[in-house]
Amino acid sequence: MEIATTPQRFDTAELATLLAGRWADVRQRVRKSLDENPLPPPEDPGTEAQREHVLAQMQQLATHGVAGLGFPASHGGEGDVGGSTVSLEMLGGNLSLMVKAGVQWGLFGGAVVALGTERHHDRYLTDIMDMSLPGCFAMTETGHGSDVQSLGTTATYDAETGEFVVHTPFEAARKEYIGNAARDGRMAVVFAQLHVGGEQHGVHALMVPIRDEQGVAMPGVSIEDSGRKGGLNGVDNGRLYFDHVRVPREALLNKFGDVAEDGTYSSSIRSRNKRFFTMLGALIRGRISIAGVSGASTKIALEVALRYGEVRRQFENPGTQAETPVLDYLAHQRKLLPALAKSYALHFAQEELVSCLHDLSTAEQVDEWQQRELESRAAGLKALSSWHALHTIQTCREACGGAGYLAENQLTGLRDDIDVFTTFEGDNTVLLQQVAKGLLTNYKDEFEELGTLGMARFVADQFVGAVIERTAARKILQRIADAAPGRDDEDVLFDRGWQLNLFDDREQHVLEGVAKRLRRATSDGADPFEVFNNAQDHVLRAARVHVDRVVLEAFVAAVERCTDPDLAVVLGQLCDLYVLSTVEEDKAWFLEHERISGGRAKAVTEAVNTLCRRLRPHAVSLVEAFGTPRQWITAPIATGAEAARQQEQRTHEQ
């Protein structure tokens, strides 16, 4: 099997620069701030103490300017939306702090920026940035999480007083799991069904005071503490109820819909559905931040586990009569190195996503197709990154044995804190449905105006033929390529073009299958809901394989940017490992659909083994290159391992 020899050394500085990417200066700025200002995760003397600890750290962050990165320069910020998102990634070692910062400056402040107008910016932004006005993002309800469009909270305009009346009409409409609500928040961006003159205009957002400056709940506002959680206990999640709470007309965040004093509703977007999706699209930063922080936490876990695996010895090697570092065992390499390769792939995909967010946020005119592509990609990467984080952190815990189970070694705390990332800022399963919707409708406006029946019929009428035609051609090309005489079954595994085509072909084939199943919705007597519901497994698979292809393309582009030949070899092997370990995981599909032969399937497994062995000497250097702030690596099994490694290196040099 022809795998390029891995260089003994490569330019680690160039790798670090490549990974730092477009916002290298922001990453360095946050590292410097963290060096000067310790922000350790709260220990566990009790929930209240943890919350107090994180609030103090929030105030500390606010005094060092990091909070203003993403806010408009006209109001004391820096207008760097991408930099703001990257700065949150850098807090991956203190997830309670990251989430609270994300709520205050990303969700609460971000909603004021994105949904409000100049009057709101003038009044609130400075106080939001410096923490004078702690706030909440009150969207989720007990009865409606993912289905935001069906929220129960109401905001009814009273033309006689010029006020909105915000109300929780039934128990399931209470605002649930709201960050900053239980203890610190004084203002909330409340999402509610807007009623004006007896007509409903869909979900809008309003600024609603929930506490006075002394921390006492405002009249008509009831607040409950969500209580102890499985993780993130430095964040004060709470429940909010509104009993006919009155706020002035100007409290409506009116960028996409406004109400005049006389009760006349107006909007630049005529369609209620389109207005709703435009509003949600403006709030995409939170979801992208979750993807980035998921990646950052995964890198911390991998660094802890790889450092420990390099120095932890177990069982004597008969050839050397010395105990063997556990990272020398192939089984251990297989646990950690494919996960490291996937972390690289997701890192580069995240960098592209943040760049797209920044460019669209600062563009004078935003192309609607690009905006929808951003939303779809953000949904897919958030899902895959958070699932990867949860799985990898648990794998790292197991790879460290009993040491990994000790709280001081970080892995159990990271695992507990990251768990909810798979279901907040969008449940991952629902997010993948959103990705699939975009694929199936080719981002057509018609979908926003259609229910399940209309979507299914639209797919059947306008999409299926084109998909079948494309995938049929790809199948023929693939079969010709596989049957070509003289082509080596093993060497083709490392052909980048073959890898890209393989992922692309899988995506197109799965889409074709979904379209065929949905076409049945147009049959006489068919129940469109049942047809769509019965195809859910296929729909979700289409989304996942699409994101796999997007991630691979980002990794390949990064390898192409590399100018150092030795580093390019190592990165290329990491990319191969990402591809082939993904193929190995989905081997059943590739075999069932005759994309690979039995012999090639065996070759994939052998190639993964070989790549793990080749990359093993560089494992710690590769994870160090991410540049995780040193403040976040506190596990004794990692810091002690590094000291031992340095001592061993000094002894070897002498």
Image (cartoon, grey):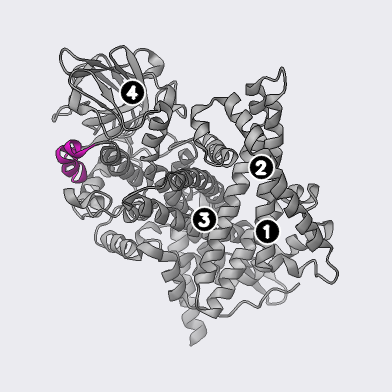
Depth check, mark 4 against mark 1: the one in front is: 1
> The residue tagged with tag 1: helix, strand or loop?
helix
**What amino acid is at disc 1?**
Asn
Which of 91/256 is in front? Answer: 256
**Distance (Cα) linking label 1 and label 2:** 15 Å
Residue receiving disc 4 = 192
Which of 207/644 is in front? Answer: 207
- The circle drawn on residue 511 is 2
Q: Is residue 413 above or below residue 462?
A: below
Around disc 1, counting alpha carbons within 10 Å, would you say few (fewer than 14), some (14 to 19), or many (20 or more)?
some
Depth check, mark 3 against mark 4: the one in front is: 4
- From the viewer's perspective, tell me whether residue 399 is left or right of residue 378: right
Residue receiving disc 3 = 346
Magenta residue span: 117-133
- The circle drawn on residue 501 is 1
Residue 124 shown in magenta: yes
> The residue tagged with tag 3: helix, strand or loop?
helix
Q: Position of residue 401 (x, y in %)?
A: 57, 53
Q: Position of residue 12 (x, y in %)?
A: 46, 75
Q: Is residue 604 above or below residue 140?
A: below
Around disc 4, counting alpha carbons within 10 Å, would you say few (fewer than 14), some (14 to 19), or many (20 or more)?
many
**What amino acid is at disc 3?**
Leu
**What amino acid is at disc 4?**
Ala
**What amino acid is at disc 2?**
Leu
Q: Determine the residue positioned at 38% across, 64% down.
A: 22
First reached walking from the N terminus: tag 2 or tag 3? 3
